[in-house]
Image (cartoon, helix red, strand yellow):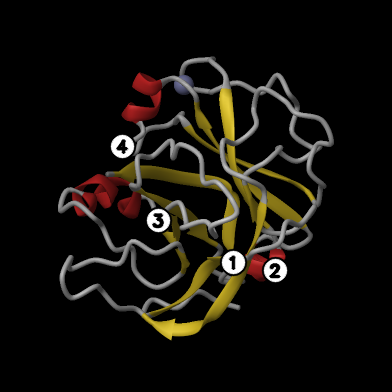
């Protein structure tokens, strides 16, 4: 499944929890060491989500990609520019179930699964002029005009758009907690292998806008 420059798959919230595969909230995967810290400020981090091959397909192969964010407000704020190291932390790990016991890395969101929507053409909301859905592939849709400038440098280095994330609306009986991104959008880029067309999940650059 190569990413399309014009079409995307939505990353959609399920109403059921899952232990492995694409998911949000709850406890982080077993494979993540509990003493993992922010590479930017060395403070504690908070779990956001995991994407598995049910959404990322062969781009992640037999692994999973988990996303964490720095708990420190000022450090997290700095992640609105593309910096490296970044308070937006992406970790590739083997397929791994959720930790059984609560940790201080737990997400404030309830634990639910994600599933991949059908391939559909990119669109923007007519009123807002952007699309702030969580989606894989297509073009990033920046909720602020400075998004284009933020990625100029990394695009020169060969990074391409991979996916974007915004906290989904949770079903009534579940809680989304406090969104660390204030209902903003996280934009994720990776380098594409020229031979295989696959994104290198071990080499990600990301930033967020609100
Ligand atoms: Zn930090």
Q: CA distance from mark 1 to mark 2?
A: 15 Å
Residue identified by numbered label 4: 80
Give the vertical position of 175 relative to 59 (above or below): above
**In the rendered view of the protein, which quadrant contains the N terminus?**
bottom right
Residue in the picture at 71% in, 37% down = 27
Confirm or deny contact between disc 1 and disc 2 (CB under 8 A): no
Q: CA distance from mark 1 to mark 4?
A: 26 Å
Specify which label sits upstream in the sequence, 1 or 2.
2
Specify which label sits upstream in the sequence, 2 or 3.
2
Give the vertical position of 208 relative to 95 (above or below): above
Please tell me in which quadrant of the rendered image residue 113 appears.
Answer: bottom right
Mark 3 crowd level (few <14, some 14–19, many ≥20, 10 Å Cα): few
Q: Position of residue 50 (x, y in %)?
A: 64, 50
Q: Which mark is residue 198?
A: 1
Confirm or deny contact between disc 1 and disc 4 (CB under 8 A): no
Q: Which residue is nearer to you in this view: 199 or 63?
A: 63
Residue identified by numbered label 2: 54
Residue in the picture at 63% in, 69% down = 115
Q: Which numbered mark, 2 or 3, is in the foreground of this view?
A: 2
Q: Is mark 3 within 8 Å of ligand 1?
A: no
Left or right of 50 on screen, residue 86 = left
Determine the secondary structure under disc 2. helix
Mark 4 crowd level (few <14, some 14–19, many ≥20, 10 Å Cα): many
Left or right of 142 on screen, residue 51 = right
Q: CA distance from mark 4 to mark 2?
A: 28 Å
Confirm or deny contact between disc 2 and disc 3 (CB under 8 A): no
Residue identified by numbered label 3: 158
Specify which label sits upstream in the sequence, 1 or 4.
4
Please tell me in which quadrant of the rendered image residue 86 appears.
Answer: top left
Give the vertical position of 183 relative to 108 (above or below): below
Q: Position of residue 157 (x, y in %)?
A: 37, 50
């Amino acid at each position: 499944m190569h990413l399309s420059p014009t079409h995307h798959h939505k990353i959609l919230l399920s109403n059921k929890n899952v232990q492995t595969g694409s998911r949000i909230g709850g406890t982080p995967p077993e494979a993540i060491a509990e003493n993992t810290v922010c590479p930017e400020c060395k403070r504690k981090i908070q779990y956001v989500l995991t994407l598995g091959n049910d959404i990322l397909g062969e781009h992640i192969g037999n692994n999973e990609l988990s996303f964490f964010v720095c708990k420190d407000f000022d450090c997290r704020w700095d992640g609105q520019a593309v910096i490296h190291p970044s308070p937006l932390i992406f970790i590739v790990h083997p397929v791994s179930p959720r930790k059984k016991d609560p940790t201080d890395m737990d997400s404030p969101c309830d634990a639910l699964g994600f599933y991949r929507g059908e391939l559909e053409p990119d669109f923007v909301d007519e009123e807002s002029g952007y699309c702030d859905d969580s989606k894989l592939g297509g073009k990033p849709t920046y909720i602020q005009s400075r998004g284009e400038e933020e990625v100029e440098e990394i695009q020169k280095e060969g990074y391409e758009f991979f996916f974007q994330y915004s906290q989904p609306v949770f079903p009534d009986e579940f809680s989304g907690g406090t969104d660390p991104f204030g209902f903003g959008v996280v934009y994720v880029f990776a380098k594409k292998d020229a031979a295989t067309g696959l994104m290198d999940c071990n080499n990600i650059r990301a930033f967020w806008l609100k």
